[in-house]
Amino acid sequence: MLALHTSDWHLGRGLHGHDLLAAQAAFVDHLVEVVRAESVDVVLVSGDVHDRAIPPVRALELFDEALSRLRDAGTRVVAISGNHDAARRLGDKSGLLDPRIRIRTDPAAVGVPVVVEDADGPVRIYAIPYLEPATANALLPGPDLAGADPAGAASFSQAATMRRAMRAVRADLDGHPGARSVVLAHAWVTGGAGSDSERDISVGGVGNVPSSLFDGITYTALGHLHRPQVITPAVRYSGSPMAFSFSEA
């Protein structure tokens, strides 16, 4: 299976007062061209599709156009919400889309994969949207972590929340030994280097997620950090399609 990992499109974002929508539309053109030229099986979008919860109308239209064009190019799309997205707003359209387009925003569904078939069999793609610890804890499958730590801080850290999500992923994988697997996640993973343009998602200074949580996953497609980075050979940030600060140049 040939997967194209992208993230952090931030449609609707400006740069020092300049509108970037024309440049972002050019990125979509390039993305569709690459998908056609390389016969990409699935495009992964690891969160922060939009730059804010209520994006400009043109940014909404551009994402809809991108999905339609990618579908027409013969690929599948699996996308998750990031910390900049309004998860409910982004997820509302998921039921109206072609079955080849999957937008996952519900923490309760992290253990339910999107299964993509290729010549070698199925690939199980687990889509973990951005998990705000204080709210995701009540939505994730499995035992509630509240009260697990007397001080409360560890239970509501990014690491504890992601650990719980990955338990749900592994519970499903346990029933499919040897299966190829992909995880999409939007988080700050230990070892990643930030830039000037990311929003801080740490909670009480415990924002980092250890990369070891993804051990055994064939490929983990991360979003949130805006520079391409290799955390381990199988855990990577794609980076955003364009620089949003001089520190990313």
Image (spheres, helix red, strand yellow):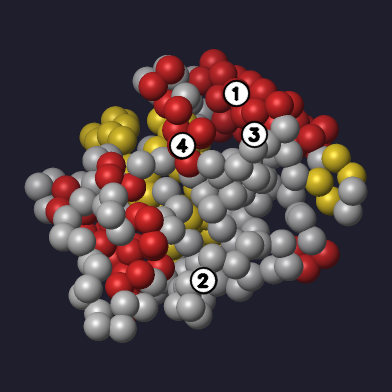
Label 4 sits on a secondary structure element that is helix
Nearer the observer: mark 4 or 1; the answer is 4
- Which callout, 1 or 3, points at the residue further toward the start of the chain? 3
The Cα atoms of the two marked residues, 1 and 2, are separated by 31 Å
Residue shown at the point (43%, 62%) measured from the top left: 235
Compare residues 152 and 42 and report the one nearer the observer: 152
Residue 101 image offset from top left, x and y in percent: 44, 26
Label 1 sits on a secondary structure element that is helix
Residue 155 drawn above or below residue 12: below
- The answer to whether the residues at label 2 and label 4 have Cβ atoms under 8 Å apart is no
- The answer to whether the residues at label 1 and label 3 have Cβ atoms under 8 Å apart is no
Residue shown at the point (48%, 78%) measured from the top left: 204
Count up the numbered dots: 4
Q: Amino acid at mark 4?
A: Arg
The Cα atoms of the two marked residues, 3 and 4, are separated by 26 Å
Q: Amino acid at mark 3?
A: Leu
Q: Which residue is mark 4?
A: 88
Q: Which residue is mark 1?
A: 64
- The answer to whether the residues at label 1 and label 2 have Cβ atoms under 8 Å apart is no
Q: Which residue is mark 2?
A: 202
Compare residues 42 and 126 and report the one nearer the observer: 126
Compare residues 88 and 93 and report the one nearer the observer: 88
Q: Which residue is mark 3?
A: 31
- Which callout, 1 or 2, points at the residue further toward the start of the chain? 1
Residue 44 image offset from top left, x and y in percent: 48, 41
User: Is there any visible trace of residue 201 in the rendered image?
Assistant: yes
- Which callout, 2 or 4, points at the residue further toward the start of the chain? 4
Residue 134 image offset from top left, x and y in percent: 39, 62
Residue shown at the point (61%, 73%) measured from the top left: 193
On the picture, is 191 further left or further right than 226?
left
Nearer the observer: mark 3 or 4; the answer is 4
